[in-house]
Amino acid sequence: MKADAIAIGIAGVAFGLIAGYVIGNQQAGVRPAAPVVAASEPASSSSSAPPPAVLDEAKVKAATAQAEQEPSNPAPRVLLGNMYFDSENYDAAIRWYGEALKLSPRDVNVSTDLGVSYYYSNQPDKALAQFDESLKIDPNHAKTLLNMGVVRAFGKQDLAGAEQAWQQVLKVAPDSPEGQAAKRAIDSLKSAHSPSAANEAKPGA
């Protein structure tokens, strides 16, 4: 994740994990196994998330000072949100994204970054509500739709809702990185629901 936007790497959804999740290996109350896709980054091709960034205290201090000196400027607040998100301090990320969004309420990327931060802090309902706000700004925002599918699948165990969101990604941006990621996710769900997958999931005698 880089500073110009945030959050999830669904495959950034580790799509191979979707089938395992459908079979029931995910437990409630733990940090989500599948990251979501950053609002301004394409989904990566790696299924392993990078280690958290080390928080650069000097940059944080400078951005905080700028935010204090420029109370109507959302940019340093977005920067602070990105830095805290990358270091996995999601509560602080939520604070700064929230402040940025108050100053720039039509910024769909910041809205989605805030939603992803809610997801990573184990607040899937707030994440989905924030994604709804993002879609009010841009109903065809592919990264929001992709992330909505991830949260529905991994945060709410709503596989039908997840597939619906991913199908919408295919509708609005079929050739984009998000569209490709959505297709892989849907294919994984269908594979997990196939008769052969069901047989493999049965416990042995």
Image (tube, grey):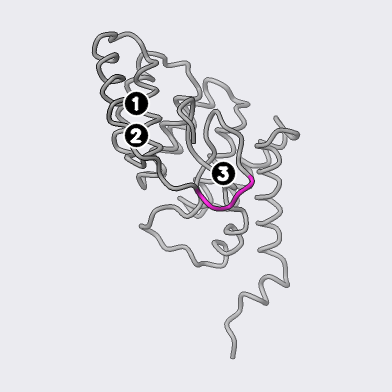
Q: Quadrant of the C terminus?
A: bottom right
Q: CA distance from mark 2 to mark 3?
A: 24 Å
**Secondary structure state at the residue bearing disc 3:** helix
Q: Which is more foreground, mark 2 or mark 3?
A: 2
Task: Name the chief secondary structure element in magenta.
Answer: loop
Check whether the beta carbons of the residues at disc 1 and disc 2 lie within 8 A of each other.
yes
Q: Could you tell whether 143 is left or right of 81 in the image?
A: right
Closer to us: 112 or 168:
112
The reply to whether discs 1 and 3 touch (Cβ–Cβ < 8 Å) is no
Question: Depth-wise, is mark 1 or mark 3 nearer the camera?
Answer: 1
Give the residue number, with chain letter if any, for mark 2.
84
For image coordinates 44% across by 37% down, the residue present is 116
- Mark 2 residue element: helix
Few, some or many residues within 10 Å of mark 3 (<14, 14–19, 20+): many
Kind of residue indicated by mark 2: Tyr
Q: Earlier in the sequence, mark 2 or mark 3?
A: 2
Q: Which residue is mark 3?
A: 149
Point out residue 102 in the picture as x, y percentages from the top left corner: 35, 17
Where disc 1 sits, the SS reads helix
Q: Is residue 28 left or right of residue 199?
A: left
What's the residue at 51%, 47% (across, down)? 152
**Disc 1 residue type (three-letter):** Leu
Tell me the magenta residue range.
Answer: 45-49
Q: Which mark is residue 194?
A: none
Q: Nearer the viewer, residue 132 or 7?
A: 7
Displayed quadrant of residue 204: bottom right
Q: Where does label 1 land, which residue?
A: 80
Tell me if 115 is positioned left or right of 158 in this view: left
Between the residue at mark 1 and the residue at mark 3, the CA separation in whole angstroms equals 27 Å
Residue 68: horizontal and vertical position, in percent?
24, 13
Q: Is residue 166 left or right of residue 110?
A: right
